[in-house]
């Protein structure tokens, strides 16, 4: 039971005993000082002890007999007031006990009984003359009306408090539902923004792919065909033609790069496939053994993130094939709670990461491209390598809460 309820129950149990003790002390003092009614002292002591025992052992906070408790209490109170009016001090607490312990139909009859006894104490005991009877009845009516008014105010306050508690409970539930709705709306908004961003990225990729296909790729294809036609018709006859051959080679390389860009803009490996499956497909087409491991709960990532990770794997395997002289490569894709990590390790010759991008032959640009790709989706790339000890690339992409794939 809460501490405040325990304190209130103790107060209700001890208050009538305290008032009874106060009434006894005042009445005994008055009897001794006035020398009136001294012969009643034994009866007062006995009845006071009986009232105290009855209150202590039969109080509603101890036994569930409120009607019997208050009936006996009123009888004992009436007898005590009749013997000594100072027991009116003990009487008035009946105004508090009746509304708290009795059924509603018995509250006002009990309050009327308390008012009769309390009014008798006001006039020095129960009336013995017609005039005192009239005064007694008037005091009783006034006391009853006042107590009824106060009790009505208290009941209304209690009803308002109950209604306020109900409204607070409803408001709490409404606030909780509103918070849930707001959280759901934030999730929907995030999904809409992600979808719009992905749709915009896909549209932009398609537009760029179309532009490259319709302009650069077509132009390079036309140059190559014209050079081949000129060669077949003898227009380029001659023993040496290094510039013509170089132009044809550059055109072929440019066309290859254009097609590679088209593939990068529209990654066929991810169409109808998951990222782990696409990475395994890329690994299967490599020129050396590649072990692919996937850990954590696989989930769908935004398209731009999956494209970046797939291109990082492709670029890393291309670099290993060209430069590392490795015998084995390991690729690990790890799905964490708030990030995805891609780890590519080889047992090749290694290199000095600080020198990347400054080679005379122009190599080393692949790492810069990886970093640029990752930076566009808030990712990072860590390169760990030492000459003669292999290389490790670790790409990390932040992502939201896991959404398991079906």
Image (tube, rainbow, N blue to C red):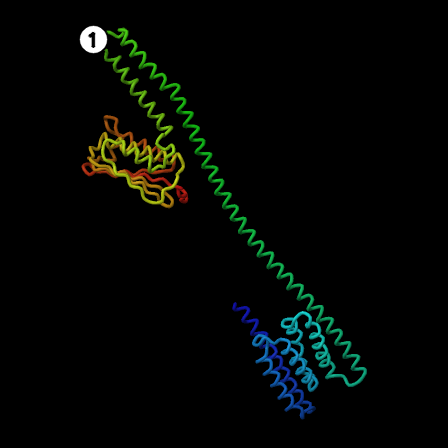
Q: Is residue 392 visible?
A: no
What x and y, as percent, mark residue 241? Answer: 23, 11
Q: Residue furthest right?
A: 130
Question: As displayed, is residue 108 above or below residue 215?
Answer: below
What x and y, as percent, mark residue 397? Answer: 36, 39
Question: As displayed, is residue 135 above or below residue 341?
Answer: below
Question: As displayed, is residue 399 above or below residue 224?
Answer: below
What x and y, as percent, mark residue 366? Answer: 29, 30
Along the line of sight, which residue is nearer the eye, 199 or 157? Answer: 199
Question: As displayed, is residue 250 above or below residue 343?
Answer: above
Q: Residue furthest bottom?
A: 39
Name the residue: 81% across, 83% down: 130
Q: Quadrant of residue 15?
A: bottom right
Name the residue: 66% across, 83% down: 76
Q: Secondary structure at mark 1?
A: loop
Q: Quadrant of residue 116?
A: bottom right
Q: How many marks?
A: 1
Q: Quadrant of residue 68?
A: bottom right
Q: Is residue 11 visible?
A: yes
What x and y, as percent, mark residue 250? Answer: 28, 18
Name the residue tied to disc 1.
239
Along the line of sight, which residue is nearer the eye, 216 or 310? Answer: 310
Along the line of sight, which residue is nearer the eye, 370 or 176? Answer: 176
The reply, left or right, for residue 67 in relation to residue 276 is right
Q: Quadrant of the C terminus?
A: top left
The reply, left or right, for residue 363 in relation to residue 119 is left
Q: Residue furthest left?
A: 388
Name the residue: 68% across, 65% down: 153
The 10 Å Cα crowd at callout 1, few under 14, some 14 to 19, many 20 or more, is few
């Amino acid at each position: 039971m809460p501490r405040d309820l325990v304190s209130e129950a103790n107060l209700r149990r001890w208050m009538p005993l305290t008032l009874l003790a106060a009434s006894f002390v005042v009445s005994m003092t008055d009897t001794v000082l006035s020398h009136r009614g001294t012969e009643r002292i034994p009866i007062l002591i006995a009845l006071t002890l009986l009232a105290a025992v009855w209150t202590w052992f039969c109080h509603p906070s101890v036994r569930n007999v409120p009607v019997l408790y208050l009936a006996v209490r009123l009888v004992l109170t009436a007898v005590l007031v009749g013997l000594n009016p100072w027991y009116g001090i003990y009487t008035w607490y009946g105004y508090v006990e009746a509304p708290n312990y009795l059924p509603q139909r018995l509250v006002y009859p009990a309050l009327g009984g308390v008012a009769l006894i309390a009014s008798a104490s006001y006039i020095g005991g129960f009336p013995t003359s017609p005039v005192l009877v009239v005064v007694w009845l008037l005091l009783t009516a006034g006391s009853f009306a006042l107590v009824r008014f106060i009790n009505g105010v208290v009941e209304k306050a209690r009803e308002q408090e109950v209604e306020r508690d109900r409204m607070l409970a409803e408001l709490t539930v409404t606030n909780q539902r509103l918070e849930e709705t707001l959280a759901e709306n934030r999730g929907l908004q995030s999904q809409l923004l992600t979808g719009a961003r992905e749709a915009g990225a896909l549209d932009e990729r398609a537009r760029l792919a179309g532009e490259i296909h319709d302009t650069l790729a077509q132009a390079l294809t036309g140059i190559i065909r014209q050079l081949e036609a000129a060669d077949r018709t003898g227009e380029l006859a001659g023993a040496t033609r290094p510039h013509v051959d170089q132009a044809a080679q550059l055109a072929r390389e440019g066309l290859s790069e254009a097609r590679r860009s088209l593939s990068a803009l529209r990654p066929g490996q991810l169409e109808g496939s998951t990222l782990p499956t696409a990475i395994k497909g890329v690994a299967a087409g490599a020129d050396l053994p590649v072990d692919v491991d996937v850990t954590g709960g696989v989930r769908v990532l935004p398209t731009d993130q999956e494209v970046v990770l797939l291109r990082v794997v492709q670029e890393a395997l291309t670099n290993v094939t060209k430069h590392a002289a490795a015998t084995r490569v390991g690729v690990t894709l790890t799905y964490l709670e708030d990030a995805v990590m891609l780890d590519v390790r080889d047992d090749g010759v290694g290199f000095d990461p600080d020198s990347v991008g400054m080679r005379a032959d122009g190599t080393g640009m692949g790492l810069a491209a990886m970093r640029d790709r990752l930076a566009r989706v808030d990712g990072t790339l860590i390169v760990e390598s030492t000459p003669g000890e292999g290389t490790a690339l670790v790409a990390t992409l932040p992502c939201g809460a896991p959404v398991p794939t079906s």
